[in-house]
Image (spheres, rainbow, N blue to C red):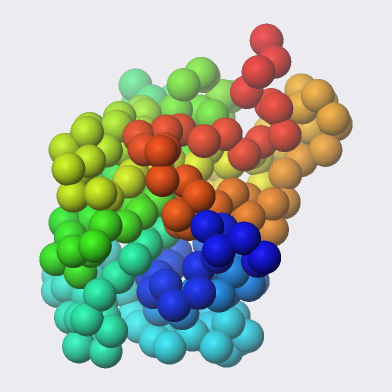
């Protein structure tokens, strides 16, 4: 990038949540890399590795690390590796969400306590945990980013359990932004438009959700992962310095329509 304020050259970033090349996290990682960042990326498990490894290779990622936030100690190991190899971290992207299928497909009132707790832990609290682990590596400040969706604010048909979970995630972003401001650490949620990803495919009747979103978007076009990535790269850069605690909508205007 010609303007150094938008450059991520010499920056070190962690991207958590790449499932394959079509993931929102992959689009963000590509944008970070194009802006000059050095990246560490994670994969969920051995089953996911063949899908994530080619993405990491194309990114020339410095680290490819296992990370299942449900497994005790794995998240801590990721940050230990980063501390050993880099000694610092400039930005973090959290793109992790999960709910048991039976709970996700039921009305919210019918979800189980166990399903609700698991969805909240994986999709929301894991961002808080990651951020706390990142703090010692961000002595010069940094950016913490997570991925949300419009269903956090308005009822989206069939989004069910994930609505309250994403609402909690967005509220956490605001509280963290306030508490970390004195450390020059900025916190954001990118509210992405509806995209056909592996994670989203678990939502019941997702094709209908996509069609409805396309019709409600002013331009009639859904957003792509590369477009979301460019927004994430901006938020990780010095140019976004005055911003923190923001819910940044990357949905081609879907959220402004009644």
111 horizontally vs 200: left or right:
left
Regarding residue 218, the answer to whether it shows in the image is yes
Rendered location of residue 41, percent (x, y): 43, 76
Q: Of all residues shown, which one is farthest toward the top?
A: 258
* Residue 15, quarter of the rendered image: bottom left
Q: Quadrant of residue 54?
A: bottom right
> Would residue 216 appear left or right of 159 to someone viewing this image?
right
Quarter of the figure with residue 229: bottom right
Q: 127 and 48: which one is in front?
A: 127
Looking at the image, residue 45 lies above or below residue 130: below
256 in relation to 16, above or below: above
Q: Residue furthest right?
A: 220
Residue visible at 72% across and 44% down?
223
User: Residue 254: horizontal and vertical position, in percent?
Assistant: 69, 26
Number of residue marks: 0
Does residue 12 appear left or right of residue 183 in this picture?
right
Q: Is residue 39 visible?
A: no
Name the residue at 32% across, 57% down.
142
Q: Is 168 displayed left or right of 73 in the figure?
A: right
In terms of depth relative to the viewer, which is nearer, 256 or 22?
A: 256
Q: Quadrant of the C terminus?
A: top right
Of 116 and 222, nearer the camera is: 222
Residue beneath the point at 27% across and 50% down: 185
Check the picture and name the quadrant holding the N terminus: bottom right
Residue at 52% from the left image edge and 57% from the top image edge = 5
Image position, residue 203 (x, y; %): 56, 42
Q: Position of residue 207 (x, y in %)?
A: 73, 41
């Amino acid at each position: 990038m010609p303007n150094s304020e938008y450059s991520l050259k010499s920056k070190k970033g962690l991207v958590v949540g790449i499932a394959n090349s079509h993931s929102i996290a992959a689009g963000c990682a590509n944008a970070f890399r194009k802006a000059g960042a050095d990246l560490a990326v994670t994969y969920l498990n051995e089953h996911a590795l063949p899908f994530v490894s080619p993405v990491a290779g194309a990114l020339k990622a410095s680290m490819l690390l296992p990370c299942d936030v449900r497994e005790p100690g794995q998240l801590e190991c990721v940050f230990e590796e980063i501390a050993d190899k880099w000694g610092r971290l400039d930005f973090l992207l959290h793109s992790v969400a999960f709910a048991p299928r039976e709970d996700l497909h039921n009305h919210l009132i019918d979800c189980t306590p166990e399903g609700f707790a698991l969805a909240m832990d994986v999709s929301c609290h894991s961002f808080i945990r990651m951020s706390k682990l990142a703090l010692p590596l961000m002595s010069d400040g940094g950016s913490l980013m997570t991925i949300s969706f419009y269903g956090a604010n308005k009822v989206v048909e069939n989004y069910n359990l994930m609505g309250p979970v994403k609402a909690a995630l967005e509220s956490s972003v605001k509280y963290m932004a306030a508490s970390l401001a004195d450390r020059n650490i900025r916190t954001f949620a990118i509210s992405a438009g509806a995209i056909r990803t592996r994670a989203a495919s678990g939502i019941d009747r997702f094709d209908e959700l996509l069609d409805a979103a396309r019709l409600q978007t002013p331009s009639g076009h859904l957003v792509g992962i590369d477009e979301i990535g460019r927004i994430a790269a901006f938020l990780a850069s010095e140019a976004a310095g005055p911003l923190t605690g923001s819910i940044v909508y990357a949905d081609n205007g879907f959220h402004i329509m009644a």
